[in-house]
Image: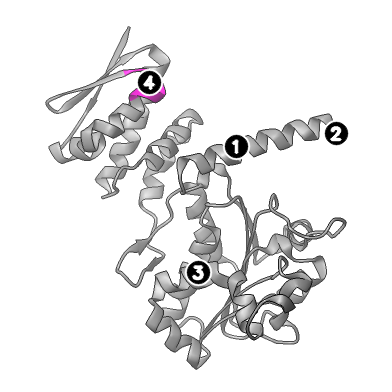
Amino acid sequence: MFEQTVDIERIEQIVNLFGNFDENIKRIEKKYRVVITSHGSQIKITGDVTDVMHAARTVEGLLVMINKGEQITEQSINYVAALVEDGEDGNIAALTDADCVCITSKGKPVKPKTIGQRQYVEAIKKNTITIGVGPAGTGKTYLAVASAVSAFRAKEVNRIILTRPAVEAGEKLGFLPGDLQQKVDPYLRPLYDALFDMMGAENFQKCQERGDIEVAPLAYMRGRTLDDSFIILDEAQNTTPEQMKMFLTRLGFNSKAVVTGDVTQIDLPDGKKSGLKDAVRILKNIEGIAIHYLTGRDVVRHRLVQEIIKAYERSAEKNERKG
């Protein structure tokens, strides 16, 4: 059996690291098949050499997060462990130094929770157009909306415009009750939810009435030129190449656009090409346009979401090899 110790500076670090009823340490023990005990200002890790070394580096990475005021969760343990296994745990300090993107209406800071998310936020800051591609739960839309609200509050833009294609509606739109806005609102609900979180429902309502914020289906964008605006196109995998070109050419002076989508969840009819896939191919290597990929590692929802995404990725790889 191999043994390694990790020094702890303050007792409150141990409290956060171990968690309620030692739940955090139990997760690390289970993951690496090691035994972890605390002895005063030290943590002792016992087990096979490789497992102990990985567990020690995971603990050290979590301590870096704790020193920066982060609360340790199951998601952060899994993320740090994944970085350790890939030899990227040296990047944890850079992640914890990430700037706050926005403050929600309840005073909660919105910060990137993974290295991929931090790079995504930086890409949005530095580029006129950013295309964020990745699976569900990676924060593509939420961080884009946070960036938009931050720019709006800083008076860098005069308007926020959020849009998405109502592909699922198709010809069934006419059967839904209400006027056109009420018919398409269900498809725009995730965008409303993110804005409510950032701004509060009352403040959002005032901004919408003044025309400072617009949430509309993609069809409403045709024929417009959008100056001094932060524009977000969500669910872009469900645009056609023609729709994508139409959207991107709406961009006016002093405007910024973020396009988000998941190429594994295309709902277009068979035979229709995805505008997102097309844009990624056509627009790469153009200065001022960033294409950023988020992966299953950047998922910040329930642990099972990561496992589901990995399972589908493995299945897709098998099908590709068979094909």
Task: Estimate the x, y position of residue 224 in percent, counting from the top left.
Answer: 71, 87
Instruction: Confirm or deny contact between disc 1 and disc 3 (CB under 8 A).
Output: no
Q: Please tell me which residue is depicted at 29% across the width and 29% down the height of the picture.
A: 25
Q: Please tell me which residue is depicted at 82% across the width and 59% down the height of the picture.
A: 269
Residue 256 drawn in magenta: no
Query: On screen, 284 above or below 247?
Result: above
3D distance between C-alphas at marks 4 and 1: 25 Å
Residue 193 image label: none
Which amino acid does the dot numbered 4 rest on?
Answer: Met
3D distance between C-alphas at marks 3 and 2: 39 Å
Residue where numbered disc 1 is placed: 310
Residue 31 drawn in magenta: yes
3D distance between C-alphas at marks 4 and 3: 40 Å
Which amino acid does the dot numbered 3 rest on?
Answer: Val
Residue where numbered disc 3 is placed: 145
Q: Nearer the viewer, residue 284 or 148?
A: 148
**Eye-nearest disc, 4 or 2:** 2
Residue found farthest to the bottom? 210
Task: Estimate the x, y position of residue 24 in percent, counting from the top left.
Answer: 30, 34
